[in-house]
Image (cartoon, rainbow, N blue to C red):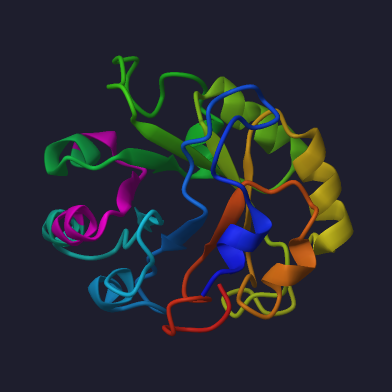
Amino acid sequence: MTVGRKLTDSEGRDKWGRSRRLPPLILLTDDVRLPDPAAAVSRLRRGSAVILRHYNTPDRAALARTLARICRRRGLRLLIAGDWRLAAAVGADGVHLPEGLVRRGPGAWNAGLPRRPGFLVTAAAHSPAALFRAVRAGADAALLSPVFPTASHPGAPTLGVLRFALWCRSAPLPVYALGGVDTRTAPRLAGSGLAGLAGIGGWTGGGGKS
């Protein structure tokens, strides 16, 4: 599957003047819709990233260690959602900040401790204001959603291609498209200025739309 490479350019420098080091594709785990994330992660293309959510899993740390091993073996980057201590414990490559954590301001996600070189921080966003808060919280990129109708929130309002492109181009940081993104809808985002694509199962054969 090559949609991510067609829509994004991972070489050179981006429009924010920084060297590109962002993965073109991000897989988000989900307790209900992706009950076996290890299998889905094993199908990802090298250079992609994984965000471990699975907030309600009893032994989340064990799952994190399992995914960390798979990611290291397959050349993937692992981010832990909402828990920088767990990320540090398993040697993850970064953290993902839910929007509620972003609203708490800079330093909330890591108690003000310095982050190691190469540590990637992404943040959830649902509005232009949230994109600017993500920057202030120290995020390297934001996952903006929902772009298209989603299986997890049927009937919920969506951004659509035009609004997503407008917010993406005016954002102060790189933006990923999240929500209903799969091999069928992703080509509609060509030219939007996105940094990459994010979803639960849109390109792993494990669940259709995110």
Residue located at (31% from left, 21% from top):
115
Split into 4 quadrants, where in the image is the C terminus? Answer: bottom right
Report if residue 158 is visible in the image.
no
Q: Quadrant of residue 181?
A: bottom right
Q: Position of residue 82 (x, y in %)?
A: 36, 43
| Along the viewing direction, whichever of 177 and 195 lies nearer the viewer | 195
Tell me which corner region of the image, top left, top right, bottom left or bottom right, holds residue 179.
Answer: bottom right
What is the number of callouts on the image? 0
Q: Looking at the image, which residue is at 67% across and 35% down?
A: 131
Q: Quadrant of residue 30?
A: bottom left
Q: Could you say where residue 52 lies in the image, as x and y percent from the top left? A: 33, 56
Which residues fall within the magenta stretch? 68-85
The residue under the point 80% across, 39% down is 169
Return the residue nearer the eye: 76 or 66: 76
In the picture, measured across the screen, residue 11 lies left or right of residue 34, that is right
User: Within the magenta stretch, is there residue 58?
Assistant: no
Q: Is residue 28 visible?
A: yes
Furthest residue in direction front, as rendered: 12
The residue sitting at 14% across, 57% down in the picture is 69
Examine the structure image and report whether residue 77 is included in the region drawn in magenta.
yes
- Left or right, 201 with respect to 210, comes to left
User: 70 or 36, which is in the foreground?
Assistant: 70
Residue 140 vertical position relative to residue 28 in the rendered view, above or below: above
Q: Where is 124 relative to 7, above or below?
A: above
